[in-house]
Image (cartoon, helix red, strand yellow):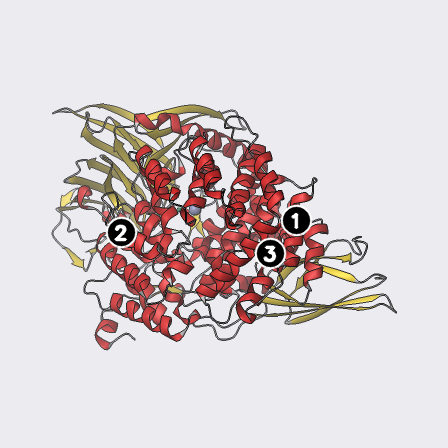
Amino acid sequence: MIDAQSALASPAVIRREDYQPPDWLVPDIALDFDLDPATTRVTAVLDVVRSSAHGRPLRLDGDGQVPTKVLVDGNPHNDWRMDGDTLEIDLPGSEHRIETEVAIHPDRNTQLMGLYASGGNLCTQCEAEGFRRITFFPDRPDVLARYSVRMTADRKRFPVLLANGDPIASGDAEDGRHWAEWRDPFPKPCYLFALVAGDLSANRATFTTMSGREVQLGIWVRAADLPKTEHALAALQTAMAWDERVYGREYDLDVFNIVAVDDFNFGAMENKGLNIFNSRYILADPDTATDADYDAIAAVVAHEYFHNWSGNRVTCRDWFQLSLKEGFTVFRDQGFSADQGSAAVKRIEDVRTLRAAQFPEDAGPLAHPIRPDSYMEISNFYTATIYNKGAEVIRMMATILGPDSFRASTDLYFDRYDGTAATCDDFVRCMEFGSGIDLTQFRHWYSQAGTPRVSAALDHDAGSGRATLRLAQRTAPTPGQPDKEPFVLPLKLKLFGGETGAALSNEQLFMLDRPTADITFDGVTERPVLSINRGFSAPVIIESDRSSADLKFLSAHDDDPFARYEAMQQLMLDTLVAAVTLGRADHEPVIDAVRRTLEDPALDRAFAAEAVLLPSDSFVGDQLEMVDPEAVFRAREALRRDLGKHLAGLWRSAYANASQAGTFVYSPAAKAARRMRSVALGYIAASGAEDAADVAFAQFEAADNMTDRQGALTTLVNGKSDKRIAALDIFYNRYSGDALVLDKWFQTQALSMRDDTPQVVADLARHPDFSLANPNRARSLVGAFGVNQRAFHMAGGAGYRFLADHLIALDKLNPQTAAKLLPPLGRWRRFDPARATLMKAELERILATPGLSKDLFEQASKSLE
Ligand code: PHE
Ligand code: ZN
């Protein structure tokens, strides 16, 4: 527990209900950067306006710096004071011009917030509260300013100078330096500010908008990486056209630049006109990037681009509204990706992500509504709940409204709130106004945390031909929310005939908005089988009494591809849970269902490859009262082995068919073939076939692309053959100069199901290529290990100690990234007392660390509560 002393030092809690509009507005700001990695001087000229008749001083946020100069209306001003990190100035009038100067040190900035150095270049990251590390400013998203930026830097080291908006002028300065000026005509919050100075080359193209304006596009990377930017550039053009077609959104500046940097805390950042990306979401070629990487690149490029409207033109009033831009923009990027290939597979992937990352969050100590009520450190709230559950909430509204009303409502939203900082409720009001539908009760999705459970029981009276579906919803308490109001759950339903497979009803959208409801179907002459939550229409857990025969039936006959996948998953889950809890299970229904899926020629291969995959160890664990990681692992391996053995011929032919592809192409059909090949290889290995390692090694050596190579490596690294050592060495030597591929080398080993993974991971942490300073590298080892349920939880607690040691070390460099990796330790309530005690001890050790960041403090203290 938290002792009195550390409780005293607890960071302040920021509450949504305390929101007050800003006292001072800043319509214009001019920034002048004298750039240098060691010391950069920043001069800021702010035009400030008193927002109402109040007598309060101007308060400008900072972070650790003290101004070297303060001018008011052009005159030196000594009557300023520091209140902690805040610069406070009393001002007599209602409009003043404030000039401050600070010195900052980019090359000492290991937090990667504010202005920092990465790979010899200088770049910024300001969301959420990084701008205050650059200069004094009211660092809150509802203060919107027009920015003009001047930068001066050494021409040789930093030949390229970029900032938001449009380039205005540039020229030479003294001593081998040069300068550039940029101006952004759109008022924006300071979290969208960005600049980049570096030795970069651009892959350029143009895009002509729907009203005929030509936009200059540039993707900026190290010159050597230019060949790896084609995919991202093409994705950008596709995304720009998609947003015009689907949402009527046109780009608004003359230039749109993207810069890739190697050191980045998140995926990418939507700074106005100058997106800055983690290089893993830009760089791709067949030799170094998997199909999943290609897909993620297109999705993230689209996501950041879409923020230009959902986030930038309309921004957030305060950080409690984060899901206003993130949930909506994830929903938009999901729609974009669905339109690029198989929509069904995309939905399966998105639901898998939600279940892997968001359901556990909603069921644990860090659960929060998509619009939180309080936080200590906002960086901790860039979560799967805000992003992915937020997207599901938008999706439900889109489902309830229907496509035409939804589009009318988003048009209204963009129109009404353009140029302003809005709230989630503003968005919902537009949905109501554009559709005439009352969403009062639906708003519980914004205020209540937790994943609803819906029980569904179907009765059939053959005599009267009446079927009755009894539905009930309940949501378990979450921290601070003991009782829940019923949610509005849009459930897509359909009945199928259990003997003929015929549809017994049309699909209907049922709104479950009370604790219980009965739905009757008449004229049901055949025993009905229930298909429910089709398309995953509501982000809930369905508990139904469907037999394994019915699930098997649906997995072969349901006409909704998601529901079909879901039936198979449920059948697999029921089988694995039975194996863990009863110690035995009948594998036959799963084997039979997988056989039928593999043999069905009408099925899209991409879909079939996903449908035959077993649920992950962690997802099986999530179904249990108490997770027994070894029992889950054994049950899953046993089922994998049986599937591998009993369907050996089918896996061999699936493997052979999928291998007939010629040279690499990135197309939906070729991707499906590669996916099926990796899945089949996994089952061939699981069967215990003697030649499995040879087949995998041959694929590893012959591969002309990273998907096949990494697929083979994963199979080897999970296996017992010595060929895994050879493959790992070959892989390492081939890619030792490529940081993004080396991340895969670390990650594949950290995710291995082998007995020795904890030891391998501990050794890798001492490898010369391992470093906590690079977030991608830290995540590839420490982060991946934390989500490897079997390895992390191996008895004895070495895994817990390892994670805590590395979080404590990483916290000193980069608190944001450290705090993101803590949640696996916070899941102690889900484990047996021996493990729980060890996990809590590590959380307590973290909390007792002197100088702990508020990021890690918040995560660790909430995890113990
Ligand atoms: N706003 C970014 C996005 O989702 C994420 C991000 C948050 C990046 C904080 C950096 C820092 O697109
Ligand atoms: Zn985003």
**Residue 470 appears left or right of 218:** right
Assess disc 1: are there few (<14), some (14-19) or many (≥20) residues with their C-alpha within 10 Å of its C-alpha. Answer: some
Q: Which residue in the structure is indicated by mark 3?
A: 569
Quadrant in the rendering for residue 311:
top left
> Which numbered disc flags the more N-terminal residue, 3 or 1?
3
Q: Position of residue 143 (x, y in %)?
A: 35, 49
Q: Is residue 355 toward the left or the right of residue 47 in the image?
A: right
Q: Is residue 415 visible?
A: no
Three-letter code for the amino acid on which mark 3 is drawn: Gln
Task: Tell which residue pokes out farthest to the front in this image.
Answer: 690
Figure quadrant of the N terminus: bottom left
**Which residue is pictured at 41% across the width and 71% down the height?**
829
Left or right, 138 with respect to 593, comes to: left
Q: Nearer the viewer, residue 562 or 176?
A: 562
Where residue 287 sits: x, y (%)? 41, 31
Identified by mark 1, the residue type is: Arg
Labelled disc at residue 99: none
Q: How far separated are the C-alphas under marks 3 and 2?
A: 36 Å
Q: Using the image as rendered, state which of residue 541 and residue 400 is in the foreground.
A: 541
In the rendered structure, the answer to whether residue 651 lies left or right of residue 764 reads right
Q: What secondary structure is found at the residue carrying circle 3? A: helix
Of 202 and 697, which appears nearest the observer? Answer: 697
Residue under the point 63% across and 72% down = 515
Looking at the rendered image, the disc whose residue lies closer to the viewer, 3 or 1, is 1
Q: Say if 192 sits above or below 213 in the image.
A: below
Question: Distance between the Cα atoms at labels 2 and 1?
Answer: 41 Å
Residue underneath mark 2:
763
Q: Mark 1 highlights which residue? A: 595
Q: Where is residue 756 in the image (x, y as percent from the top left)?
A: 35, 55
Q: Which of 74 and 212 is in front in this view?
A: 212
